[in-house]
Image (spheres, helix red, strand yellow):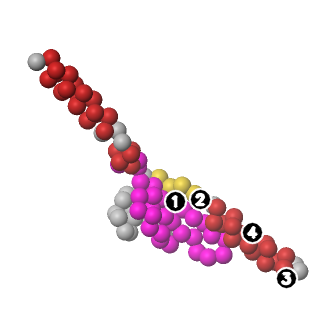
């Protein structure tokens, strides 16, 4: 009879350990909007859940419907466009 309780205990531990996997972390993370400012073109925003890009700063994603609780700015694209523009100006002799 003691083997039965040992097996039940091991199964319970495995179930609890399995509940803390990658999927539960993804479900726990709160959706947020990633703002991508651009140097030349219109600014864009991106959904952190599904990756959809849209031009307006919305409070929810138009594709998956996730309600954004915060916003984060990602200026890498702006920096790349600015550097390209500077390179073009240097080539023109400005």
Point out the residue furthest to the top here.
Answer: 2
Q: Is tag 2's residue or tag 3's residue first in the polypeptide sequence?
A: 2
- The CA span between labels 4 and 3 is 14 Å
The label on residue 92 is 3
| Residue 53 location (% of width, % of height) | 48, 69
| Neighbours of disc 2 within 10 Å: few (<14), some (14-19), many (20+) | some
Check disc 1 and report the residue beneath it: 34
| Neighbours of disc 3 within 10 Å: few (<14), some (14-19), many (20+) | few
Residue at 24%, 27% in the rendered image: 10
Of circles 1 and 3, which is in front?
3
Please give the range of residues in magenta.
Answer: 27-55
Q: Is tag 2's residue or tag 1's residue first in the polypeptide sequence?
A: 1
Check disc 2 and report the residue beneath it: 74
Residue at 35%, 64% in the rendered image: 64
Asked if residue 73 lies in the magenta stretch, the reply is: no
- The CA span between labels 2 and 3 is 29 Å
Element on which disc 4 rests: helix
Question: Where on the picture, by quarter, is residue 61?
Answer: bottom left
Point out the residue furthest to the right here.
Answer: 93
- The CA span between labels 2 and 1 is 7 Å
Element on which disc 3 rests: helix
Q: Is tag 1's residue or tag 4's residue first in the polypeptide sequence?
A: 1
Is 38 on the left or on the right of 13, as rendered? right
The label on residue 83 is 4
Regarding residue 59, the answer to whether it shows in the image is: no
Q: The C terminus lies in which quarter of the figure?
A: bottom right
């Amino acid at each position: 009879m003691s083997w039965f309780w040992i097996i039940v205990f091991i199964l319970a531990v495995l179930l609890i350990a399995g509940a803390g996997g990658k999927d539960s972390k993804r479900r726990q993370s709160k959706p947020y909007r990633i703002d991508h400012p651009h140097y030349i073109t219109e600014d864009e925003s991106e959904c952190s859940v599904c990756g959809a890009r849209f031009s307006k700063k919305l409070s929810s994603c138009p594709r998956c419907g996730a309600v954004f609780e915060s916003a984060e700015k990602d200026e890498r694209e702006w920096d790349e466009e600015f550097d390209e523009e500077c390179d073009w100006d240097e080539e023109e002799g400005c």
